[in-house]
Amino acid sequence: MITNTQLLKLKDRSGENIAKARDVLLSMQGKIEFLRDLKVEVNIRQGASSYDLLMSAQYDSLEDLEAYIIHPVHVEVAKYIAGVLETSAVVCYES
């Protein structure tokens, strides 16, 4: 199993904008066959150095992760996120 985690800091850090980004990310669930599990958590302790969202996704293999990245549903979600994103950090590991 492969787990890919992302920390996302948004340009507009309002609660409404964070909730919308979370909903957009969660909209992929059940629509991409390679995506085994998806969790998106909202940070409850905001600060200058904190991130707003934690996304954790699981795949059966690295090949499935690569297929997910180019899947049309993910591509559309990624376009939205790119427009609202200030910065991100990623860790991908075997689980």
Image (cartoon, rainbow, N blue to C red):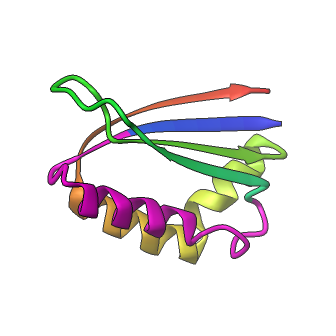
Residue found at x 65% / y 60% = 68
Q: Which residues are magenta?
A: 8-34
Say whether residue 47 is left or right of residue 26: left
Q: For the N terminus, which image quadrant? A: top right
Please, which residue is most extreme toward the front here?
44
71 vs 56: above or below: below
Give residue 90's position: percent from left, percent from top: 47, 32
Say whether residue 95 is left or right of residue 31: right
Asked whether 31 falls inside the magenta stretch, the response is yes
Q: How many numbered marks have been drawn onto this rendered protein structure?
A: 0
Give residue 22's position: percent from left, percent from top: 44, 59
Q: Nearer the viewer, residue 81 or 18?
A: 18
87 vs 83: above or below: above
Residue found at x 56% / y 36% = 5
Q: For the C terminus, which image quadrant? A: top right
Q: Quadrant of residue 16?
A: bottom left
Q: Nearer the viewer, residue 54 or 90?
A: 54
91 vs 36: above or below: above
Give residue 35's position: percent from left, percent from top: 73, 58
Asked whether 35 falls inside the magenta stretch, the response is no
Residue found at x 56% / y 72% = 27
